Image (cartoon, grey):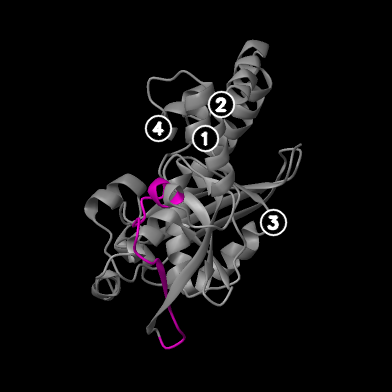
Amino acid sequence: MKEKYVVFDFETTGFSAQKNEIIQIGAVKYDENDVEIARFNQLVKNQRSYVSSEITELTGIKPADLLNQPTIEEILPEFLAFIEGHLLVAHNAPFDVSFLYQAIIDCALTGVEAFRVYDTLAESKRLLQMSSYALVNFKELLGVSDLRSHDALNDCLITAKLYHYLQKSEQNVSEKILTEILELGENADANEQLDLFGENTDEITESLRRKLNLPITKALVYYRQDLTRKWQKFDVTGIRIEQEYSTGASLSVTLYHTEQVRIHSDFLKEMQKANFVSEMEEEK
């Protein structure tokens, strides 16, 4: 069944969601019939990292371009309202989703919905044969060679074309492949099925800890800043995997007082470090 979706992309100052930051947000909203209905394109003022010459060369964004732009605290609520209730589509989605989750943490926002994400990188590797799956290498195939890469809005338009292409490819999957998938499911080991069922509950099992690279015996904790920017620590009493990506997963985490929060598994793993708070303070 087709649904409304938003294709989004971030340009950032680097590869680490905790050390670097978003400097451009691009997004394009589509209806159920793949008709574009709205765009979101905004530069974001950097606050904790600098725009290197390499980033400027790659994206065309200069440090001076960001001086009078809104901060992520100012623009993120507007972006979250733009994407609310929509499937999110991105190329190498774990990268962009990790920056989105970190921005939500940095801005101390609560009550954010769980994101449903379609990763065109993972799906293109499953459905297509390419020498390279970098987004730039799809431009000729999709007839958008005139669009400059590493501009957040342009990359959204390219990714949207790729998403449409993949949807058509999905419809053409052969009956043989579908049969093999069904047979694989029927022949799956019963114990593995039980483990999978267990991971869909909130129980923090040893297999779930191993899957998410969390400490096996240590009590799990969650950190966030209060309104005065002081770090608070909470015990984690439940974890549910909401969405798995090629790297990591989107989690629904239950805290000791039954509050539920959303977080990427990589960030929950980082929070288990003894020096997590001091590292975050150093990055300010």
Q: Which quadrant of the figure has residue 193?
A: top right
| Magenta highlight range | 208-228
Choose the circle earlier in sequence order: 1 or 3: 3
Where residue 255 sits: x, y (%)?
Answer: 52, 71
Check disc 4 and give the amino acid type.
Ala
- Residue at numbered disc 3: 85
Mark 3 and mark 2 residues within 8 Å of each other at the beta carbon? no
Choose the circle earlier in sequence order: 2 or 4: 4
- Give the spatial CA distance, label 2 vs label 4: 33 Å
Where residue 233 sits: x, y (%)?
Answer: 40, 77
Give residue 192's mark. 1
Q: Quadrant of the C terminus?
A: bottom left
- Residue at numbered disc 4: 134
Choose the circle earlier in sequence order: 1 or 4: 4
- Along the line of sight, the residue nearer the viewer: 139 or 198: 198
- Along the line of sight, the residue nearer the viewer: 274 or 107: 274
Check disc 3 and give the amino acid type.
Gly
